[in-house]
Image (spheres, rainbow, N blue to C red):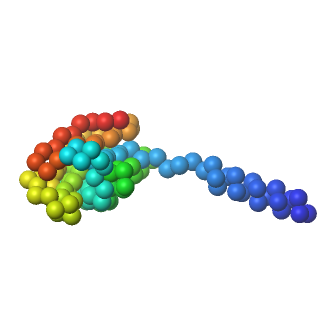
Amino acid sequence: MNKIVFALLLSIASTLAFAQKKEYQLSSHILDVSKGAPATGVGIKLEKYNENKKVWDFVDQKNTDINGRITDFLPAERSNIGIFKLTYFTKEYFKKANTESFYPFIEVVFQIKDGNHYHVPITLSAYGYSTYRGN
């Protein structure tokens, strides 16, 4: 009986340990090129364009982690085709560092056309930024 209970517990534990990780279709990160380091704790808001109403609908808002990343926007198990906007709230980030900056926030608009993963990174400094489609 003990062997059966042990085998059952071992089976449950291994199932939980190797459960499939949830996949996400959109990620972003911010690299502060003036410091050569990730921008930690920056708020990023995600919105989707509603073409019928001609307005932006809120989807999610998160803060960058210690590596300057957000990896879990838009669960991949549903269709996410459409036009999206990421708003990077940079004012507070620079304020915490006692750094004057030019951009209080940055908006990046892009289109998801398929089920592939989309990565939208920002390279940032107090007076400039750049973005591109990463992978």
Q: Which part of the image, by quadrant, shows the C terminus?
A: top left
Q: Nearer the viewer, residue 125 or 28?
A: 125
**Residue, x 82% and y 56% (percent of image)?**
7
* Quadrant in the picture for residue 109: top left
Q: Is residue 99 above or below residue 35?
A: below
Q: Position of residue 35 (x, y in %)?
A: 24, 48
How many marks on residues?
Answer: 0
Between 124 and 43, which is closer to the camera in this rendering?
A: 124
Q: Image check: 68 left or right of 90?
A: right
- 36 or 82: which is nearer to us? 36
Which residue in the rendered view is the most extreme toward the left?
102
Query: Residue at horizontal 36%, vertical 56%?
Result: 65
67 displayed left or right of 53:
right
Res. 74 in view: no
Q: In the drawing, does residue 93 fall left or right of residue 28? A: left
Residue shown at the point (16%, 44%) measured from the top left:
129
* Quadrant containing the N terminus in the rendered view: bottom right
- Extreme right residue here? 1
* Residue 66: image location, x then y, percent: 37, 55
Asked if residue 94 shows in the view, the reply is yes
Indicate the position of residue 17 as horizontal and vertical percent values: 64, 53
Residue 23: percent from left, percent from top: 46, 46
